[in-house]
Amino acid sequence: MSKVVKFGGSSLASAEQFKKVGNIIRADKERKYVVPSAPGKRFSNDTKVTDMLYACYDLADQGKSFKAELDAIKARYQEIIDGLQLDLDLSEEFKIIEKNFKAKSGNNYAASRGEYLNGIIMANYLGYDFIDAATVIFFDENGEFDAAKTNEVLRARLAESKEAVVPGFYGSMPDGTVKTFSRGGSDITGSIVAKAAKADVYENWTDVSGFLIADPRIIDHPEAIETITYRELRELAYMGATVLHEDAIFPVRQEGIPINIRNTNAPEDNGTWIVGSTCQKSKYVITGIAGKKGFCSVNIEKDMMNSEIGFGRKVLQAFEENGISFEHVPSGIDTMTVFVHQDEFMHKEQKVVAGIHRLANPDMIDIESDLALIAVVGRGMKSTRGTAGRIFSALAHKNINVKMIDQGSSELNIIIGVANDDFETAIKAIYDIFVITRL
Ligand SMILES: Nc1ncnc2c1ncn2[C@@H]1O[C@H](COP(=O)(O)OP(=O)(O)O)[C@@H](O)[C@H]1O
Ligand SMILES: N[C@@H](CC(=O)OP(=O)(O)O)C(=O)O
């Protein structure tokens, strides 16, 4: 029996937090494999070590002095080492880092040092083996994660250690250079390690008591979700519920390993269980709400569009030719709307419009910017009538203009488009109607 435990940056931001983590690990001997992130924020306007490393490397890359910035990073680690009274000296490691920065080793290498150094401290503190992720997590020549090679090498390496620390967030390319996952990627490492270890559970420790029904920065003390399916979670994570990286679901999902989101600051709380399937009904009709700002909608009209074979394909081709992915494509009889990320679309806007004209010859194209998309997700919606209607009336009540509403064919989610400025109010209204008043 083994558990893989990943601790996020907020759980490892200081020596005090490290001590909580140590107690959690020691409380259960099955917690054999530990995946740490880099030290995160100690207080709300603090800087994550990962961001300090990016900024420091930027200076190095421009040939400027980065001494003060590197010293500040050293100080973050020294504070942890001193607070834990460890007999550990990272000065040789920092010499290597400085040398590599001067040799312009790249910002992936730079960012990865946050987890690497924290892993060394964690292994020393716990008395566990240290496994450098660059030796066990692999990317292929295209920079894609190499699941097969990683699983084989990592599984064999874990079998050699009774207990080990594998730093999160990075691995290596075929030429040996370090590559990171995208931001928040230590969650992915945790999932990969859980798969390779054939763990019974992947515990993901953070600073909230589980996956909450809505973002706590928008809703005051939202309730935690007790059980959520991988599919529901994928919808929410994709739409911005950042507690777990969206790609962290795949490795454990293949193996049927449940994820348990837990709170380092309240370890007695059960947290949230993320599972393949469950007979447990969710407490409310909806399981969760998440959303993102910063979308544009491109509205295309053409008479008799519905009878023109291939119209949709031609429109989407114009986006494809410009390397733009689309989020949602709701359509009517003579209209079709394509939702895209504003920052991706902005500087290619006119090229795409010209492309649509050339390929699909529409009657009219209209673009609207500064939109937000909100996903209301829940396995309970399938068996409940009128969910979309309730959302509509809750939003109308708050004078929010609904730009788009789109129910996924799985009936697992409803996507709503509103103006960026209405985003928070809309989430509050939806939370109120389903959770507070339970209508
Ligand atoms: N639905 C949600 N449930 C829980 N937390 C959420 C949700 N949406 C956004 N968050 C935010 O995600 C944060 C945890 O993720 P993250 O910052 O990556 O933590 P860590 O440093 O532990 O990896 C929470 O502090 C919270 O502000
Ligand atoms: N430290 C990296 C990777 C990571 O996963 O961090 P956290 O677990 O603190 O989200 C980042 O900031 O992106």
Image (tube, helix red, strand yellow):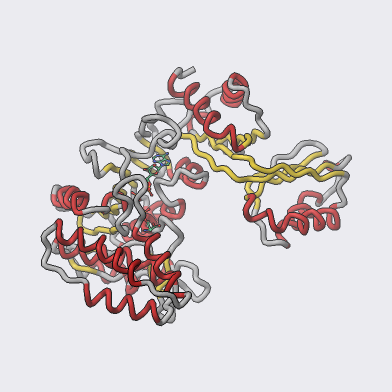
- Quarter location, residue 59: bottom left
Picture layout, residue 361 above or below residue 376: below
Left-right relation of 413 to 204: right
Instruction: Find residue 242 and report its horizontal and vertical position in percent.
Output: 43, 46
The residue located at (69%, 58%) in the rendering is 347
Instruction: Find residue 411 and report its horizontal and vertical position in percent.
Output: 57, 34
- Quarter location, residue 270: top left
Is residue 338 visible to the viewer in this orientation of the structure? yes
Picture layout, residue 289 above or below residue 241: above
Depth order, front residue of 281/341: 341
Instruction: Find residue 131 and report its horizontal and vertical position in percent.
Output: 26, 69
The residue located at (39%, 80%) in the rendering is 102
Is residue 149 visible to the viewer in this orientation of the structure? no
The residue located at (20%, 50%) in the rendering is 21
- Number of numbered labels in the structure image: 0
Left-right relation of 304 to 412: right
Picture layout, residue 8 above or below residue 197: above
Left-right relation of 244 to 144: left
Left-right relation of 283 to 354: left
The residue located at (48%, 33%) in the rendering is 379
Q: Quadrant of ligand 2?
A: bottom left
Instruction: Find residue 330 and report its horizontal and vertical position in percent.
Output: 70, 40
Depth order, front residue of 423/60: 60
